[in-house]
Amino acid sequence: MTAPSESPADLGARRADEYLQLLDAGRTDDAEALLAGLSDTRELVFVGAGFTALARRTGRTLPTAMRAQASTRQVLLGQLRDRSRGDVEGLRRWLREAGEEVRTVHRLAEAARARLGDQAAVS
């Protein structure tokens, strides 16, 4: 019996994680190569969905004002994605910005936890 193949959504989420790990390791050239290797609009959109899920999941743990700001940035990223429909380079730009948003939200969540302790997610 063979294992089921990875769904496009799962593959996109895995690639999003991989991209972030490369950036965190300072391997920006490898991260760019990962994005350059994605030439299908569908692949790019699934990676973006992975970033969105990560950012929103972490954003929900932020204090109220930070959460509202993160939500606004997600709306702006969605607008960038919509303007880039059919433009592979535009979608790659969207992915770069979405990846940076995930990193920003993670840093904000860490700072909030350090400053507020367990109250950080309760605002």
Image (cartoon, helix red, strand yellow):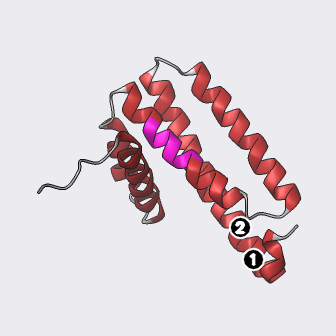
Please say whether residue 42 is one of the residues in the magenta stretch. Answer: no
Using residue 95 as the reference point, say whether residue 2 is left or right of it: left
Q: Amino acid at mark 2?
A: Ala
Q: Main secondary structure of the magenta part?
A: helix
- For the N terminus, give its image quadrant: bottom left
- For the C terminus, give its image quadrant: bottom right
Tell me if residue 8 comes above or below residue 90 in the rendering: below
For the residue carrying disc 2, how many other residues have a C-alpha within 10 Å: few (<14), some (14-19), or many (20+)? many
Identify the residue shown where x is 63% and y is 50%: 101
Q: Which residue is mark 1?
A: 113
Identify the residue shown where x is 79% and y is 70%: 121
2 or 110, which lies in front?
Answer: 2
Q: Amino acid at mark 1?
A: Arg
Q: Range of the magenta residues?
A: 46-52
Q: Are marks 1 and 2 in contact (CB under 8 Å)?
A: yes
Cα distance between the residues tagged 1 and 2:
6 Å
Query: Would you identify the image quadrant in which residue 106 lies?
Result: bottom right
Looking at the picture, how far across and down is residue 62, in whole percent?
A: 77, 63
Using residue 93 as the reference point, say whether residue 59 is left or right of it: right
- Secondary structure state at the residue bearing disc 2: helix
Looking at the picture, how far across and down is residue 52, in whole percent?
A: 58, 46
Residue pushed farthest left?
1
Q: Which mark is residue 109?
A: 2
47 or 94, which lies in front?
Answer: 47
Identify the residue shown where x is 44% and y is 57%: 17
Query: Would you identify the image quadrant in which residue 2 lies?
Result: bottom left
- Secondary structure state at the residue bearing disc 1: helix
Looking at the picture, how far across and down is residue 103, in whole percent?
A: 59, 58
Residue pushed farthest front?
1
Tell me if residue 56 comes above or below residue 123 in the rendering: above
For the residue carrying disc 1, how many other residues have a C-alpha within 10 Å: few (<14), some (14-19), or many (20+)? some
Identify the residue shown where x is 65% and y is 60%: 58
